[in-house]
């Protein structure tokens, strides 16, 4: 018989590795409030946007889960 619930196992939520998917400013596709025409590949690759960079209109990463 298969058990559907295993109380001895702790559920661990994994964080999305793509920082943009966790940001309150994310829009559809690969756009956001900071980069409405497309998020630069440098930010997607680095996984960091905690400080303002040229072209982000002063909008930086804000975690939507906090």
Image (cartoon, helix red, strand yellow):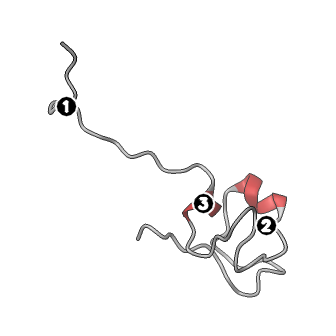
Which residue corresponds to the image point at 76% horizontal and 52% vertical from the top-left? 45
* Viewer-nearest residue: 42 or 16: 16
| Location of mark 3 (residue) | 21
- Residue 52 found in image quarter: bottom right
Which circle, 1 or 2, is nearer the viewer? Answer: 1
Query: Where is the N terminus found, in terms of image quarters?
Result: top left
- State the CA–CA distance, disc 3 to disc 1: 29 Å
Q: Earlier in the sequence, mark 3 or mark 2?
A: 3
Label 3 neighbourhood size at 10 Å, few (<14), some (14-19), many (20+)?
some
Which residue corresponds to the image point at 34% horizontal and 42% vertical from the top-left? 12
| Location of mark 2 (residue) | 39
- State the CA–CA distance, disc 3 to disc 2: 12 Å
Callout 1 secondary element: loop
- Residue 4 found in image quarter: top left
Q: Picture coordinates of residue 50 (x, y %)?
A: 63, 72
Which residue corresponds to the image point at 71% horizontal and 87% vertical from the top-left? 58
Which residue corresponds to the image point at 77% horizontal and 80% vertical from the top-left? 56
Q: Are marks 1 and 2 in contact (CB under 8 Å)?
A: no
Q: Picture coordinates of residue 22 (x, y %)?
A: 55, 62
| Location of mark 1 (residue) | 5
In the figure, 59 relative to 65: above or below? below
Q: Picture coordinates of residue 55 (x, y %)?
A: 83, 81
Callout 3 secondary element: helix
């Amino acid at each position: 018989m298969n058990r559907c619930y295993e109380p001895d196992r702790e559920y661990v939520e994994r964080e999305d590795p793509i920082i943009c998917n966790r940001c309150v400013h994310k829009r559809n596709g690969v756009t956001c409030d900071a980069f409405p025409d497309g998020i630069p590949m440098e930010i997607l690759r680095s996984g960091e946007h905690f400080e303002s960079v040229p072209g982000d209109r002063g909008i930086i990463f804000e975690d939507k889960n906090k």
